[in-house]
Image: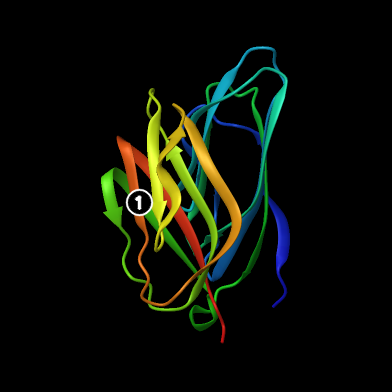
Amino acid sequence: MADTIKYMYEDAVPTTATAVYTVPSGKCAVAKSFVISNPGSVARTFRLIVGGIVVAYDHTIKGYDTIFIDDLDIPLLPGETIIIMGSTATIKAYVTGFERDYVTSEYSYQKINHLLNGSIMTPANTFDAMIKAIVICNPNAVDTQVGVTLKDYLIAPQKVVKANDSLIIPMPKLFLPKGRQITLSASGSNCHVGIILEKVVQ
C-alpha cells in the first residue's frame, strides 16, 4: 500500500508531556520534519520525544523565532508515540510524516536508544546498515562533552553540547558494517542518544 503523507500534529503545544500522535495498529510511520514556532516576544522552552528518541528537552526558543528540524526520518512502530510539551500553549508545532502498512519482514529500520552516564558501547548490529541520523540531547542545566566512535572518532569526545541543547546530525549517510559497534561517551550524566539505522539491501 502507498504511503499516506499527513500532519501527525499541527496545533498549540500542550503544557504537560502529552502523546500528540500514536501510530495506529497495523501501521508503521516515519516522522520527517518538525517545526516549532514561538509567536510571542518572550523566550519559551519545549520538549520533543519521537518514538523514544529525545530530540529536545527544555530547549529554549527565542521570542518570534521558529525552529525547523528536518531530514531526521525517525521511524515509529505500531503503538509508538510523539510526545510534545511546552512551557506555554502559545508555542505552535507542526509534525509532518507518513504512515504505511506494517509488515515485519519488510521493516528496514532499527533505533538505538541510550541514556548515557559516562561511556557505553551499542550492541553489534546483525546486518549491514546506513546510519540515517544521530541525536544527542543534553537535558542538564550545564554543558557536557560528548563523543561518538565507529572505528576511530566520528565525533571527538571534547565536542561540547550546551545545556538543554541537542546535537542533531541528519542524514550522515555513514555505512555501518554487520557486527560493528558504536561507542558513545558523555562527560555529564543522563544525556540521551538516539541513532537510526536502515538496513542495506544487497
Residue with the mark numbered 1:
184
- Which residue type carries mark 1? Leu
Residue 120 at x, y = what percent? Answer: 28, 53
**Residue plotted at (70% across, 30% down):** 66
Most extreme residue toward the top, as rendered?
Answer: 41
Residue 14 at x, y = what percent? Answer: 55, 31
Could one spot residue 20 in this view of the protein?
no
**Residue plotted at (41% across, 61% down):** 150
Could one spot residue 138 in this view of the protein?
yes
Front-most of residues 177 and 166: 177
Residue 46 at x, y = what percent? Answer: 54, 29
In the figure, residue 63 lies in which quadrant? top right
The N terminus lies in which quarter of the figure?
bottom right
Instruction: Using the image, determine if residue 6 lies above or below residue 139.
Output: below
Instruction: Using the image, determine if residue 103 lies above or below residue 53.
Output: below
Instruction: Using the image, determine if residue 193 lies above or below residue 92.
Output: below
**121 with respect to 175 (left or right):** left
Front-most of residues 105 and 190: 190
**Residue plotted at (33% across, 61% down):** 122
- Residue density around tag 1, few if under 14, some if 14–19, many if 20 or more, within 10 Å: many
The C terminus lies in which quarter of the figure?
bottom right
Q: Secondary structure at mark 1?
A: strand
Instruction: Using the image, determine if residue 119 lies above or below residue 187.
Output: below
